[in-house]
Amino acid sequence: MPLACLGLSHHTAPVDVRERHVFPAARMAEALVALRDYEAVREAVMLSTCGRIEIYAELEDYEAGSEQLKTFLRNFRHGDVEVDISSYLYTLFGAEAIDHLLRVATGLDSMLIGEAEILGQVKDAYVQAQRAGSLGKILHALFREALAAGKAARTQTRIAGQSTSIASAAIELAKRHLTTLSGKSILIVGAGKMGSLAAKRLRDEGCRRLLIANRSQSKARRIVDDLKAAEAVELPGLVDALSEADVVVTSTGATHFVVRPENVRQAMASRPERPLFVVDIAVPRDVDPDVAGIANVTLVDIDALKGVINTTLEQRREEIPLVEEIIAEHTKRYADWYQSRITVPVVASLVEKAEAIRQSEIDRLFARCPELSERERMLITGASLTIISKLLHGVVTKLRLQATSNRSEALSLAHTLEELFDLERTSAR
């Protein structure tokens, strides 16, 4: 099975490595088109999130294909620092790649087990590949199966139970650091999904003042209007907002640092004795790491949330065996479909030949019996279709079942059918 997954994730690479390989939405189409130009890559889908960058591909050849995928990742990274990513990468082939994608889609492979966002991100990756023309039958079927498994896990188990998210974990970490957020002034930088989730949670925590800063003021105002308990501030006024804040939570889609040391130093100059706690949950990071060196400022990134997350997910962990049953079911369903593909050409040829004979004989009969009424013609046509369907059903079913259990025997049976029925020889990819 020439399926492969090449990637790095929060399991294998720290945030400073992951951020150099994040593919912004604006570059995804460009990247997928570039992937199609690699000779050994037949199909490709890219999944880029705060926790992982993965390429799923159907390859002409495992060895050449995996090397070309690595070359692609090296060519398309961003960031000025040269990093050898080889030690951070993992490569999965065949059944392992299928199982991995289903674990990702169901949330079992996330930093936050059962996180709600990942299924939407898998779907977005699938849609992007469709639009870029890098998706073929193999990955189309695989991602449809993964999405079905992810939906089943969320509806049939409690893997996504409770309201824990990356944003809420960031707030929990801030609460632990400050003891309470009640009466505190909080600044959220970024008005996307994570920023919106953080704002809603902070409102419930009883903070004294909640500021939302975003490049697009309309997005910030939408959150403010929704909460009726926040203020929108412009990014040019970031220093003033920082000087007011006790806690800063950042989550933008920027590819550069939004909060820089000079911003924080200027803000802290007006409140040197009052500490500032900054949680950066963006990948690439929003906050320059040098901010951590400023007096009375504490900076943590998304990787620091693992400890918080691990203590809040006991209920979800109890659901893991149920989710793994769902994964096994969908993995088998996909594997059976994949194996049965070898039967497609001979089945298509057999059906095509049977239909051609049926249509020819029906046309001959109707030409010899012009007196037949329209209803009689319909009845005869229907009977002929039923005969063909029933005659071929057993053969086709047995051939497909054989393909899922013994590929070599299925191929032998397919060749026998081609010879017996004088079918044109074709082969599946």
Image (spheres, rainbow, N blue to C red):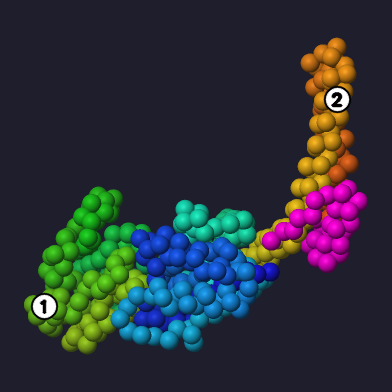
Residue 404 % position (x, y): 78, 62
Amino acid type, residue under disc 1 in the picture: Gln
Amino acid type, residue under disc 2 in the picture: Arg
* Left/right of residue 150 with respect to residue 312 in the rendered view: right
Q: Which quadrant of the structure image shows residue 90?
A: bottom right
Quadrant containing the N terminus is: bottom right
Q: Which quadrant of the structure image shows residue 428?
A: bottom right
* Residue named by callout 1: 266
> Magenta stretch containing residue 326, yes or no?
no
Instruction: Please give the label number shown on residue 364.
Output: 2
Mostly what secondary structure, the magenta segment?
A: helix
Q: Which quadrant of the structure image shows residue 255?
A: bottom left
- Closer to the camera in the image, 273 or 70: 70
> Magenta stretch containing residue 412, yes or no?
yes
Kindly give the residue lying farthest to the right in the view shown. 420
Range covered by the magenta-colored residues:
400-429
- Closer to the camera in the image, 239 or 331: 331
